[in-house]
Image: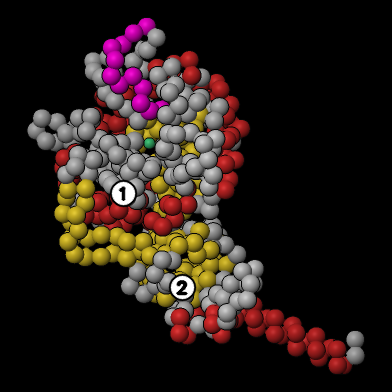
Amino acid sequence: MNRLTASIFLALVLATCAMAQGQQYDLLLKGGHVVDMANGINGLRDVAIAHGKIAAIQKGIPASSARKVVDVTSLYVAPGFIDIHMHVGHGGASLDWFESAAGSPTPPLGLIADTALSSGVTTIVDAGSSGARTFLRQKLEVIDRSQVRVLAFLNIVAAGMNSGKEQEVAEMDPRLCADTVNNYREIIVGVKTAHYWTEKPWDADHPPWAAVDRAVECGRLANVPVMVDFWPRPPERSYADLLLKKLRPGDIHTHVFAQQFPVLDENGKVNEALYQARQRGVIFDVGHGQASFWFRNAVPAARQGFLPDSISTDLHTGNINGAVVNMITTMSKFLAMGAPLEEVIRRATVNPAAEIRRPELGTLTVGREADIAVFELLSGRFGYTDCGKAKMTGSVKLENRMTVRAGHIVYDSMGLSMVEWEKAPKRYFTVPRLASDPPAFAEE
Ligand SMILES: [Zn+2]
């Protein structure tokens, strides 16, 4: 190495070091109020991201240390929300839908999974849309193609939800269910049962507890929790028996504030069975849905301090325009009912992560995948609706402003991360000649 090449080499090394020191982060969210319940953080912090992971979370991280800085002053920054009750599918159909041979005339129930991102949600759990025989297709066609992280509760009914087979006990095979859970443990986090024998008289082919018992048996075989959508029919199938005898610690009762449950006793107090169940470790989840959330149950329970363990939507094509709308609206309802912000965030982050046994999710711990919601807390007068076609007026509302998934900004409808168009670099103002020319983006 002669002196010239040595000095060039030295210069290169120094330049590389300077660059590495100068811009060690890919993205920096600066000036926000961080709420990260897993780490007990509720205050001003900057959040730095590198290689898709949380790289630093502290006060005063210099703007010069990141290739991209987003000013999130006056906004809240939390771990991306986890919605453990959603239904995902094609959310429509292929573009040849109008061809007569294209597909089913039945409107699809499942939403496009990535619609969840606009609400600050970075992990969803599909709640039993598919069963042992249909899961692989849902995985290949929907789950594997989503930007949002998609996990699943496997329906105990092998043909899945709305298959026309939810009343056939022979379709509920705990062994087949457990084998499928074991084959896809990276995605399947539990078992789901729903909609079983809610109307007709009992008969020999339809024992009252068949669906719950078989789902719990699958959960036992595969060592995963069970999520139960339930309709009490006492005396043979009572709510108290579900909570105190059938569900195991860690099993999840979704739709907790639905109309069919005796959430309150005759004196308007929260039913003692709910406290006893909670003591046993039974989990209460919102699962709002189109028919599972009534303020007459939720508001008195919240006032008496009985909040659900997790907030979830049960979103599907039938309730995106109401009564659910989205995850952050559902979270806002609890804030408007008087739950403190950090308790609302807890129930959309760490708690659901623990319920599905994925404690690495729902936190901004350094080293974890950078899934982040940036949202605003609004004050004013806001109407909130329930499934009984009644409303509650509240004075606070959360609105999601930006979502980061695995370090990438995947939702930014107000352009928090973007430059004002007049100040965009030259390339933004170029006129492409051909449709195949690179688009004139303000940013690479
Ligand atoms: Zn559901």
Q: Residue at x 22, y 44 (%)?
A: 386
Look at the image and tell me whether residue 338 can be seen.
no
Point out the residue furthest to the right here: 2
- How far across and how far down the image is residue 235, in percent? 23, 15
Q: Position of residue 266 (x, y in %)?
A: 10, 30
Q: Is residue 147 visible?
A: yes
Which kind of residue does numbered mark 1 sit on?
Answer: Asn
Element type at marker 2?
loop
Q: Are marks 2 and 1 in contact (CB under 8 Å)?
A: no
Whether ligand 1 has any atom under 8 Å from the Cβ at mark 1 is answered as no
Residue beneath label 1, please? 321
- Dot 1: few (<14), some (14–19), or many (≥20) neighbours within 10 Å? few
Q: Is residue 101 left or right of residue 243?
A: right
Q: Mark 2 or 1, which is nearer the eye?
A: 1
Secondary structure mostly seen in the magenta stretch: loop
Q: Position of residue 354 (x, y in %)?
A: 43, 44
Please tell me in which quadrant of the rendered image residue 395 appears.
Answer: bottom left
Q: For mark 2, what is the residue?
A: 417
- Residue type, numbered disc 2: Ser
**Ligand 1 appears in which quadrant?**
top left
In the rendered image, which quarter contains the C terminus? bottom right
- Rendered residue at 39%/69% (across/down): 414
In the image, the segment drawn in magenta is 193-204
Residue placed farthest to the top in the image? 204
The stretch drawn in magenta includes residue 104: no
Q: Disc 1 on helix, strand or loop?
A: loop
Q: Residue at x 33, y 54 (%)?
A: 328
Residue situated in front as seen by the camera: 114 or 224: 114
Question: Badge 2 local density, few (<14 within 10 Å), some, or many (20+)?
Answer: some
Residue that extends furthest to the front in the rendered view of this protein? 100
